[in-house]
Image (tube, rainbow, N blue to C red):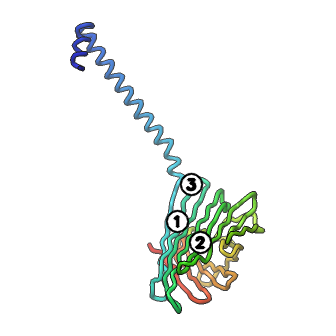
Amino acid sequence: MIPFLIYMLIKKHGKQTCLNMVVHLRHMAAVKIHFMVVMIIIFLLTLMPLISKAQSLRLKYKVSQGSNDIGWLTIERQTNGNRLTLVLLSEIKTRFVFMINVFTKECSIFENGKLQTSSVYRKANGTIKVDKQTSLNGGQYEVSEDGGKSILPITYIGKNLLSLYFQEPIGISQVYCDKHECFIALTKTGDGAYKLLFPDGSSNCYYYQGGICTKVKVSHNFYSANLNLIP
């Protein structure tokens, strides 16, 4: 079909005219391809700032009790512009009088350095122990748990427990604890850790290297454990 069309063009317009038309068409095709390449480059340049704004960092910890490994913990930080998302997952299997399997999931979302929403979920041996959500509504923090809601006497939360894994709390005197719904004072210990003493009598000690938490000592009324960062 195409050879026939070329033959007809040559017959009607002459050989030189047809050659000029072919050259013109080739030039138009090259211009079109050049235009598409330029548009793709412009699109990629537009997309690059959005990609550079989105960053992610994941930390993994081994949970041990004495010389025994009893579980794991991972926490991920995702930043996208002014939005910061922290997600913690943990599973611990250990034995006191009987075998205990504890799964934990926590999530916090900050915008412009202020907590917007957070959630704490904890299940032990298949039974939900904690299922709590905190959200900022109309300048006040509202806590939802067990079908009920309450208003916190707090208007600003800039740091909570999840924040401590990614930033050494230099110059910070307290952080918010979502589980206990209150601020917990930070005290510096003799070995360089930052200690939190919770209302139930348990405590956490956070150790840092290069601004990142490398170790957490957990002391509970019934047990103690260490979280060690996996390189």
In this image, 188 relative to 34: left or right?
Answer: right
Q: What residue would you read off at disc 3?
A: 80
Extreme bottom residue here? 97
Q: Amino acid at mark 2?
A: Tyr
Q: Is residue 197 above or below residue 146?
A: below
Q: What residue would you read off at disc 1?
A: 76
User: Dot 3: few (<14), some (14–19), or many (≥20) neighbours within 10 Å?
Assistant: some
Residue at horizontal 50 percent and vertical 44 percent from the top: 47
Residue at horizontal 52 percent and vertical 84 percent from the top: 100
In this image, 1 relative to 80: left or right?
Answer: left
Which residue occupies the foreground of this view, 56 or 151? 151
Instruction: State the image coordinates of residue 161 (x, y, percent, origin top left).
Output: 62, 72
Please report whichever mark, 2 or 3, sits nearer to the chain's N-terminal start: 3
Q: What residue would you read off at disc 2?
A: 121
Q: CA distance from mark 1 to mark 3?
A: 13 Å
Instruction: State the image coordinates of residue 110 (x, y, percent, origin top left).
Output: 63, 60
Where the C terminus falls, by quadrant?
A: bottom left
Q: Amino acid at mark 3?
A: Asn
